[in-house]
Image: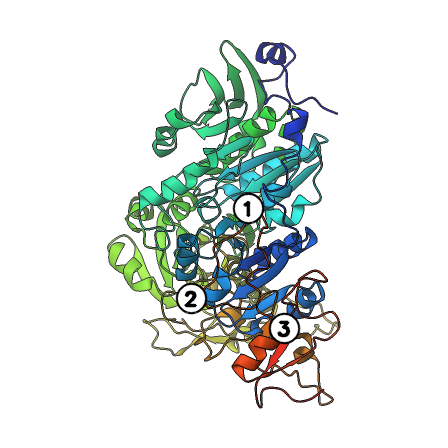
Amino acid sequence: MRPAGFSSVQNLRRGGPPRVEPLSEEQRTRGEPQFDLRGKRVLVVGLARSGRAAAHSLRRHGAVVTVTDSRPPAAFAAEIPELLSAKIGLELGVHRLETFLRHQLIVVSPGVSWDLPQLVSARQRKVHIVPEVEAASWFLKGRLVGITGSNGKTTTTTLLGRMLEASGFETSVGGNIGVPLISVADQTSAESISVAELSSFQLEAIQDFRVNVAVLLNITPNHLDRHPSLDAYVAAKARIFLNQTEKDCSILNADDPTVMSLAPAIRSRKVLFSLRQDLPDGILVSNGKILYRVSDLERVLMDVADVKLRGAFNLENVMAAAAAACALGADFEAVPRVVRNFRGVEHRLEYVRQIRGVEFYNDSKATSVDAAVKALSAFEEGVHLILGGKDKGTPYAPLRPLLERRGRRLLLIGEAADRIAEELAGTVDIIRAGDLETAVRGAFRAAVPGDTVLLAPACASFDQFHDFEHRGRVFKEIAERLAAEEQASALWPEARSSSSVEVSGAESGGRKKDVAPTPHARSQGSGLPIPSGQVPPAPPTVPEPHLWPKVLSRPKPVYVHEVAAEELAPAECELWQEPPDEVYYVERDLLRSSSSGRTDRETLLYEVAVAVTSDPPAADITGSGAKDDITPPDARAKASGARWSEPHSGGGSSAPAGVGGQGRLFEGSGKRTSG
């Protein structure tokens, strides 16, 4: 097994930089929570990917688990049978205050606001509340790396994971990258290294969560629609260093003044990286090479030319990943090899294709203004930039200088179009396209060979798409359809005249516009000669234009239970619906298909774990009196005038056998048919 580190001078003489000290035997197991979960009542708030993962993990560790989500049962038809088979209780359709107050531990999914009134009341009653990553850390073994920042987290996390895997380490990657951290915890061992992408949503409420290596890439204004101020957002990011010690390591961007303003308060050993400074210690660029320098000793890690990703910001991501890899004892030959073979992450300045000399790039993950600035800076000129979506509260003015120098047209989509048009007026021609298909086709019609069509929205995607990944996939699908249409028109010019799409932009007035009149088609639309005696094949089928959803509006505030990621919005079925008049609880038989093929979803109360009391007790972490507040089911049934029935096999309560308050179907008159 590769050692975690030796003295810095010894490492450098052997060809390596200083590294994190080896973990003691006590440190190798991060440990169970400070209380026994067995039989404790645990509520998980939010039933998306991270919430489901947390519920299953806590149930495996013996907790009596209930999941609450404000969306109705219809949104969870696929998940309900799985949860019930694991004896996990459900409260769907509303967040009831009494449910929050009667639990001893609450685990919160990253997309749920900590200002949720029920959470505020639970904190006032001293209920123990933790974020999902905090619960995950109870079960993680080995070393943990946390990577945060406003931009570049996913690229850096992916790179570091691959560097460590190529070096022979047992590696797990999770967190905000899309795999809940708690779902990989049970797979770790004392020799593992877990790499976690961490958002401000995940860090803002941590208490004892500790990372051995903390990476802070950059800080720019973001998520001001959730955080009350920029200072609050910065403070949330800074919590990644909260529980580090002198034996831990922090990787910091020396070129970011906000990042460096946090450095004096950081207790761990600091490793800096910089594109612009000649650092006495850290990772830097010199004469086309990336160096790791300590005092008067240094090592060449790789050539700048080894980095195949566009943009100086991606070079920073590579340097940060390399710094963390070196601190963890990675193979110095493996690090540049991984970088040379790395072509990026989907939806992060992703090259899609070229059509008639016009290149298409998908940076749907550019959900902040700063990310869009970085994406635009990767191109010299001729950029047709697609902006817009759900506004996040930050100004768009930082895009102005780059647009004036490198932009050709600005095509606006989504709810934020009016505000963007107002703040960027006078930069380049602004087209209110409305939807993504109109924007992409409009950009391609106006482009000439050498231009670039760039999706870098600077906004969230929730107004028109499920999430940024959905938006990016749609962009790529449109580009592929355009390529098929161009190929068809080159062989059969008459096929072009029959292809038209509905244009909903303000300039078009919703009229039909032919796909045909592009600069490329006019120059190359004459078709190819067919040798005599041969029958030309039938022209390829051009897919029908895709119909995109209209901009949706919803009442506020809305607490979105996201997919373990700050930029993933609710699925289509999760879009706002008026809360039901009564609480929905779901029992497995409700999803059983009838003989006609219909799936029944009748409204029922599904009581789990314990009964509601009129005066819920404060949290009891030690376990004493854990069952004192349990009202017998029969008593509650009589008090409410309803009747009780025994739960079906496998469904109902997550309470262990013999625990009071076993789950029951609570039937009201006319609420359920027999059987």
Q: Which residue is mark 1?
A: 133
- Image coordinates of residue 59 in percent, x first then y, are 66, 56
Closer to us: mark 3 or mark 1? Answer: 1
* Residue 376 in sight from this viewpoint: yes
Give the amino acid at mark 1.
Val
Q: Earlier in the sequence, mark 1 or mark 2?
A: 1
Vertical placement of 605 versus 427: above or below?
A: below
Q: Which residue is mark 2?
A: 463
Query: Marks 2 and 3, how far apart in space?
Result: 24 Å
| Mark 2, other Cα within 10 Å: few <14 / some 14–19 / many ≥20 | many
- Image coordinates of residue 154 in percent, x first then y, are 54, 44
Give the amino acid at mark 3.
Ala
Give the amino acid at mark 2.
Asp
Query: Marks 1 and 2, how far apart in space?
Result: 28 Å
- Image coordinates of residue 36 in percent, x first then y, are 63, 46
Q: Earlier in the sequence, mark 3 or mark 1?
A: 3
Question: Residue 417 versus residue 195: which sits nearer the camera?
Answer: 195
| Mark 3, other Cα within 10 Å: few <14 / some 14–19 / many ≥20 | some
Query: Marks 3 and 1, how far apart in space?
Result: 26 Å
In the picture, measured across the screen, residue 407 lies left or right of residue 287, that is left
- Image coordinates of residue 315 in percent, x first then y, are 50, 33
Q: Earlier in the sequence, mark 2 or mark 3?
A: 3
In the picture, measured across the screen, residue 461 lies left or right of residue 602, that is left
Q: Which residue is mark 3?
A: 77
